[in-house]
Image (spheres, helix red, strand yellow):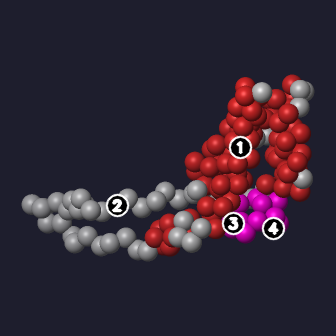
Amino acid sequence: MIVAKQRGSEHMRPIVSLIVILSLAGCAGGYHRAKREMAQPAPRVAAATPAVTARPSASATPAPAAKPFATGQIQRACMASDRKARSRELCGCIQAIADQTLSGSDQRLAVSFYGDPHRAQDIRQSDRDNHRRFWTKYREYTDGAERTCR
């Protein structure tokens, strides 16, 4: 029983990861704060003379990397969902990661989870080889989306 619970919780990780991503996107200050900081102009550095070179100060922080963005079926399903945390930027980032890790048919199956979350559980628990292969790729996708799109 304990082994089954541990194995089951391992397979819920991608679903929980996606929920966490969507939740973080709506946090006051999370993703949107980083976006505002990116929009601020970079500080100007005085022109260097031949004898003096400009060095960035130790307190300067690097600008956050721009998040990838794409449009597609997952992005549209994400935007059409009733989740509070959805945003154009988050849904586009999730689609970009899906384009890197999931085939078109895998993306169609993942889109079905938006309308029927229980379907994800059915696929995860399925004994069919193609469902096992899909779930392995889907976990890779959700892990990548969580790392990249937060």
Residue drawn 14% across the image and 66% down it? 49
Q: In this image, 33 relative to 48: left or right?
A: right
Give the secondary structure at mark 4.
Answer: loop
Q: Tag on residue 82?
A: 4
Nearer-N-terminus badge (4/2): 2
Q: Is label 3 in contact with label 4 (beta carbons under 8 Å)?
A: no
Nearest to the observer: residue 48 or residue 59: 59
Residue 20 seen in the figure: yes
The dot on residue 85 is 3
Please identify, in this view, whether the residue under mark 4 or under mark 2 is nearer the observer.
4
As measured in the structure, the alpha-carbon distance from the residue carrying label 2 to the one carrying label 3 is 27 Å
Judge whether residue 77 is colored magenta.
Answer: yes
Between marks 3 and 1, how big is the CA–CA gap? 17 Å
User: How dense is the environment of label 2, judged by Cα within 10 Å: few (below 14), some, or many (20 and up)?
Assistant: few
Element class at badge 2: loop
Q: Amino acid at mark 2?
A: Thr
Q: Earlier in the sequence, mark 1 or mark 4?
A: 1
- Residue at 87% x, 29% y is 130
> Which amino acid, by three-letter code, is at mark 1?
Pro
Q: Earlier in the sequence, mark 3 or mark 1?
A: 1
Q: Are marks 2 and 3 in contact (CB under 8 Å)?
A: no
Q: Which residues are magenta?
A: 75-91
Instruction: Tell me, for residue 14, which label it has, or none.
Output: 1
* N-terminal-most mark, 2 or 3: 2
Q: Position of residue 120 (x, y in %)?
A: 84, 44
Q: Quadrant of the N terminus?
A: top right
Instruction: Give the residue type that dot 3 points to.
Output: Ala
Residue underneath mark 2: 61
Q: Is residue 7 visible?
A: no
Q: CA distance from mark 3 to mark 4?
A: 9 Å
